[in-house]
Amino acid sequence: MQLFPCPFCGPRSETEFHFGGDAGNHRPEGFRDVTDGEWTAYLHERNNLRGAANEIWMHMTCGEVFRMERDTVHHGIARSFALTEGDGDDRLAH
């Protein structure tokens, strides 16, 4: 079992968390203007890089969404950040 650091609750079992995707994967805007290719890319195309990853996670127990930096090779976690209101990616609260 791995412990994930929830910025609101502290270290918790990985079983309490849900992966939300890559940080920076912005949903296309404009219902009628989005092409099938843009929507497919948003839903299915991922970097899946080896090493450092910047991801969005949800702690299911407290319901908070946050950003976590971790290494996909050795599963080490560098840090986690609370997301600020109105943004899911760029502005972080420490």
Image: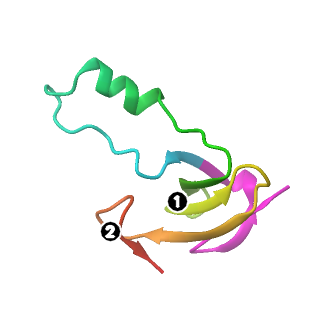
Residue 2: within the magenta? yes
Question: Can residue 5 be seen?
Answer: no
Which residue appears at 57% of the width and 74% of the height?
8
Which residue appears at 75% of the width and 62% of the height?
76
Looking at the rendered structure, the number of numbered marks drawn on it comes to 2
Q: Is residue 30 left or right of residue 90?
A: left
Depth order, front residue of 67/12:
67
- Mark 2: amino acid: Glu
Q: Residue furthest top?
A: 36
Which residue in the structure is indicated by mark 2?
85
Which residue in the structure is indicated by mark 1?
63
Q: The residue tagged with tag 1: helix, strand or loop? A: loop
Which residue appears at 58% of the width and 73% of the height?
7
Q: The residue tagged with tag 2: helix, strand or loop? A: loop
Compared with 64, 43 (above or below) is above
Using the rendered view, name the quadrant where residue 4 is placed.
bottom right
Residue 74 is situated, as x and y percent measured from the top left of the image, at 80, 54
